[in-house]
Image (tube, rainbow, N blue to C red):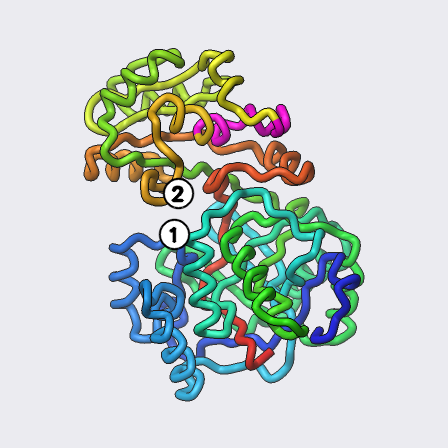
Amino acid sequence: MPGMESSERAGLVLRPFHGVRYAVDDLAAVTSPPYDLISPEELRELLGRHPNNVVRLILPGVSHYGEASAALTAWLADGVLTVDTLPGLYVYEQSGVGFLQRGLIGAVGVGSAAVLPHENVLPEPVADRLALMRATQANLEPIFLLYEGGGTASRLVDDVATQRFPSMDVRTREGVHHRLWAVTDPNEIEAVAEDLRERQALIADGHHRYATYEALRKDHLGPGPWDYGLAYLVDSTVYPPDLQAIHRVVPGLPLQEAAARAKGAWQVHEFASVEDALAGLARATGPAFVLAGEGPAHLLTDPDPLQVEHAMPAEQSARWRTLDTSVLTMFLLPKVWGINDSEQSVMVVHHDPLAAVEKARRVGGTAVLLKPLATDDVLTVAAQGERVPRKSTSFGPKPRTGLVMRTFAAD
């Protein structure tokens, strides 16, 4: 709460807040995926769904942050968005074919050693999100946190979801069912706080937004709502996450050239189809990648251990140095191809390897397809205080944007 001492923030704090929610008939039409998963084509489609779709707030475009702020102010004034009277935590449930995930949405204490990042960030996305948060004075979408629970907070989440009537119930066009409950009882909120106090949480998704929370907090000298950031907290022992790969596309690097240059350091196996190469990737042990685009696909396996050892930073742990994304970022991209890993030189495609191949063909480049990292590897690296390279992991299911937001004025 405002005025909370830094020593209290040393533990995991999930604070109640006054939720900002849509008051429109078609809730499915105003929500969206997280901002960094929306392609230009999807953005146009979402903008066409509803004049008040949340993408008008989260993706206003460079130098248009003021428009997002003006829209937020207008929608609050017009009643498109309303502010919950009582502060609360929010039980949030996502379900679909073959999956169910529940957790708590609240305002997490920023700057605590109990919040563990595991992935590096780039300055450009942080600058973008910081400009947006400064303009809107709001947290428009939650970061995604995982923790090992099994306590009071976990039991409350399931009790609420199975015994109470939801305040929000919506099925999106993607076929996912979203339900939300407000928990406003001070005794229940205090019981959650007591349970979480000695725990830690891993940032599963939202590293750039959490870095933005930290930067925004540094903008202010005194305590206030900027000491917290919107977060979705899931007990991974009850709801194990789905960890998927994030693939790369290197524009301007033709596939045949990429494969030829790799032969000096890797075993390169040619496949007629991407699907066959991906099957080989799934069976491979040790660092391995599929290169695809125009022409046959290529599976890279068994890199020269001496070359890899020389490329990897000596100060990193042995576990870190064996991660596929570490080998990609420190060896394959810079040493084999002479490419620096940046947003400008290396594109990313979440989850779908065939979408990455199609993008590579469009830009005359090479898709680098990866296996997902193991959850244990990510947790071990984070616990050691290390961070994996940017865009190494995609934990899911990710929270839907627009179901509940947080403004500093309301909080």
Disc 2 and disc 1 in contact, CB within 8 angstroms: yes
Circle 1 crowding by C-alpha within 10 Å: few under 14, some 14–19, many from 20: few
* Magenta stretch encompasses residue 323: yes
Q: Please name whichever residue, 358 or 49, is drawn nearer the observer in this view of the structure.
A: 358
Visible in this render: residue 182?
Answer: no
- The residue located at (45%, 80%) in the rendering is 81
Quarter holding the N terminus? bottom right
Going by the numbered disc 2, the residue's amino acid type is: His
Q: Please name whichever residue, 219 or 223, is drawn nearer the observer in this view of the structure.
A: 219
Measured as percent of width and height from the top left, residue 411 is found at 60, 78
Going by the numbered disc 1, the residue's amino acid type is: Leu
Distance between the alpha carbons at the discs numbered 2 and 1: 7 Å
Quick check: 179 above or below 201?
Answer: below
* Magenta stretch encompasses residue 359: no
- Residue 41 found in image quarter: bottom left
- The residue located at (52%, 40%) in the rendering is 243
Q: Which mark is residue 350?
A: 2
Measured as percent of width and height from the top left, residue 317 is found at 63, 28
Q: Is residue 252 found left or right of 349 in the rendered image? A: left
**What is the residue that sits farthest to the bottom in this orientation?**
77
Residues rendered magenta in the picture: 315-328
